[in-house]
Amino acid sequence: MRRRIGIGAGLAVVMLLGLVPGARAQSSPTSAGSSASQGSKTVLRVGETADMDTDNPFAVSGGSDWTSVTIQYDMLLKFSDADLSPGPSLATGCDHSQDYMTWTCTLRPGLRWSDGTPLTSEDVAFTYRFVMKHRFPQYISYFPFKPVFTTPNDTTLVWTAEKPTFAPDMPPWVYIVPEHVWSKYEDADLKTIKTAPNTPSVASGPFTLTSWTRGQGWTMDRNPYYWGPQPTFDEIQFQVYTDQSAMIQALKGGQIDFADGLKPSLIDSVKGDPNITTQQVVSDWWLNFAFNFGGQGPQAHPLPALQDLTVRKAIEMAIDKEAIVEKVYNGTAAPGDTVVRPASAYWHLDIPADQEFPFDPAKARSMLDAAGYVDTDNDGIREDPKTGDPLVMNVPASQDTTGAVEAGQLIVGFLKAIGIQVKLQAASDAKMNDFWASGNFDAYIWYWSGDPDPNYQLSIFTSGQCGGWSDGCWKDPHYDALYQKQRGIMDRQKRLVVVQEAQRYLYEHIPDIVLAYPGWLQAYRNDRFTGWVPAPGAHGYLLPGYNYDSLTSLRLVAGASGSVSSPGLPAWLWIALIVGVLAVSVLVFRRRRGVDEEA
Amino acid sequence: MGQRGYMARKIFHAAITVLFVLTFNFFLFRVMPGDPVSLLARSERLTPADVAEQRKLYGLDEPLPQQYLTYLRATLTGQLGVSLRSGEPVSSMIGRALPPTVLLVGLGTLFAAVFGVLIGIRGAWHRGSRFDNSTLLGSLLLYSVPEGWLGMLLLIVFAGWLGWFPAGGYTSGTTTGFARVIDIANHLVLPLLTLTLGYIGEYVIIMRSSLLEVMHEEFLQTARAKGVPERLVRRDHAVRNALLPTFSLLCLSFGYVLGGAIVIEAVFSWPGLGRLTYDAINQLDYPVLEGVFLIASIAVIMANLVADLSYGYLDPRIRAA
């Protein structure tokens, strides 16, 4: 009896011991062939922090939606790598008439959709008409002055507007969809269109969406009909990681090739690893401290002192933007100045340091003293000489905007040092929306992201946007004139002058304080793929981002294996373990029964 | 009253509880500030007019009592609505999230219970031994450690550093058939280990303490005097009588299975009901939240009912009362 147990247990132990080294070998990322391998396909594995909300190009909202749609679909003209200015895509270029009211765009010959159907100018015209008919909020602003589209032949699109426009040159950030797939939704209602399923997709880009397992990830496969250089690999697998620390571990362990979107605090954990390269992406959004000037409705009673430019100047000079960059963003941001984000490299105005408002709390204090805002009752808070009320500000901060609440906490301290009390309130974006619409705040901390073209960002500061997109209903006729002027200049270089003038005007008149330009962080394994193309510029996005050029230029690093097995115990080890456990338990059970029988 | 009356009363109470839960769920989420449309307003470039229009589209602008009646009518006829974020029917979202959760939490609860009970029994029977002291300490330690932290630790060691197991997810890529089973098994190891270790302490401690209470009862002396071997004294007389508190814990735990293990599912990116809840909370996706909470509440109520009804069967002392 005992001998049998000994042999049985011994066998089990030997099996287990023998399998462990086998398990380790299987988990090496460069080993080919195991029960969980991807076959002979070369796969790029990307970790994302959020799942797509939708696969439908007309319902895009979250970051992963944009990534997926930007890879699959082309626009008429693309955002070029250097500075997001228009570059050839489906169209090789667009020419304008003398009066800028008629634009003629020429498409490449021989374009096809991923199902082989020819791609013609009718598809572009259909897409644009579809957007205008249903007025999708993400796209409608690209079609001002009621344009009409005609297609004299398969490769020509004519855009005719009622007034001179540079809209086709922005370029319009609208993805071109196949008419033969979407025409059936021509007369449908908005809800039906936005919930129309789109997997697998028919598209024109280098990869199409072939499968989507909600909550887990999605897969994109190479499009053989793509008009540009064929990618060197077959498939992209996107995997959703709810927890960023887990995603970092997956990157370090070689389970993914690319991590899209890291918190600044996690950068340190990959800094020392020679196989991982990080990319701090130039910012395409800015952290916003917006003042309220009132006028939204009955609940809008902002602090009257904020109407005084001196007070706003003092506040800006009391805020240490460098401290925000270091403490809130771990150095992965830049201090802010103008409202057009740095990613719009062509348009962004960088005010030289000697012309910016300095961080100088002492000067801020003396400015406020000179203007009559003194602390009359010695409670540390200055009073407004006109109303007698203390300078107390209610400031909601968005907790869904990275760094907003933390920056708010620093600002409470900064403003206390100059005698202004800030009552900070963290709020979800839904609640922020309530504050914004009702005007029930003195200032708030939120964000703006804008477009490659500055028109939209500049428009929100116009008087007409009070009740629309304006933060706090700031109204300045001189600014309105500047905005209208840049909107009417067709020549890029001439327009740039006015756009920069508008940015400087906003900087000097402070309807908002641009606190910081937080960057996006991406990281990749440099021992797997090489040939990443950042856009815009050297500190651009490696993966969309704004265009998919990385994907058409990536290739495996010499020596790296295309197919990788996912980690874990191989099938035979599982079977052996289960058999081993069953064998041991059967032996134990029979021994016990034997003992009972003896008793 | 009799057996029938007892059952009927318990079932009736359960039904009332479900109705209360339905009402409470509805108002609980509406109390949170904002709504799913205004959450997306800034990123989708919606003006306040657009927001109002979309609210109307989703029926979010109707007065609250009317929304409640609509919800009640729909739920009682089995329609759980559609997700406000993706438009997918809530029932299919829950159906998709159910298997991963049942697999992870069901197996984890089972392992924790089985091993916990066995360890607790042995610990109590050999009280004061090295085995007892070390397992008691281990259980207290494991039970007090936050499961998220424990999960992260296991992930860093076994996935990041050693690379033995995936750092998250349910499957890798589209595998089918037997390969898929193995793939899921590999992904299951770390979260299952975390969950089992997190819950095993409960069972060890409860089993141990209830067995200790019974161990000095006189009827055990009687059994020994009759000549029953020690192992059978332990199994048929002591443990059987000490099992009741563990049994109620077990019933409730299985009821909680359908609530999902939110923290562990978040750490390991496990696409179960817990993660569905986590995402829906962040997105203020009311119909999904209502659906998930309904399922979870019904599961707990049912488990409680089963426990209640089976006490009578298990313990004759209760039946006689």
Image: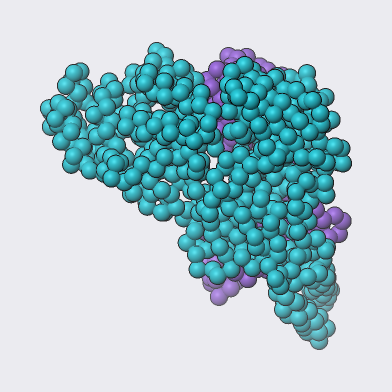
Chain colours: A cyan, B purple
Quadrant into which the C terminus of chain A falls: bottom right
Residue A243 versus residue B192: which sits nearer the camera? A243
Residue at 79% of width from left, 64% of height from top? A37
Residue at 54% of width from left, 68% of height from top? A273
Residue at 75% of width from left, 77% of height from top? A22
- Left or right: where A487 falls relative to B233: left
Residue A130 versus residue B272: which sits nearer the camera? A130
**Compared to A347, does A590 lie above or below?**
below
Residue at 26% of width from left, 24% of height from top? A308
Where residue A7 sits, quadrant-wise, is: bottom right
- Left or right: where A412 falls relative to B103: left
Residue A215, image x, y percentages: 69, 44
Question: Would you say residue B67 is visible in this rendering?
Answer: no
- Left or right: where B28 falls relative to A562: left
Residue B236 versus residue A93: which sits nearer the camera? A93
Residue A303 versus residue A567: which sits nearer the camera? A303
Where residue A571 sits, quadrant-wise, is: bottom right
Where residue B311 sits, quadrant-wise, is: top right
**How many numbered circles are shown?**
0
Quadrant into which the N terminus of chain A falls: bottom right
- Left or right: where A465 falls relative to B192: left
Residue B11, image x, y percentages: 72, 31
**Compared to A573, does B270 lie above or below?**
above
Residue situated furthest front in the rendering: A98
Residue A114, image x, y percentages: 82, 42
Residue A222, image x, y percentages: 79, 51
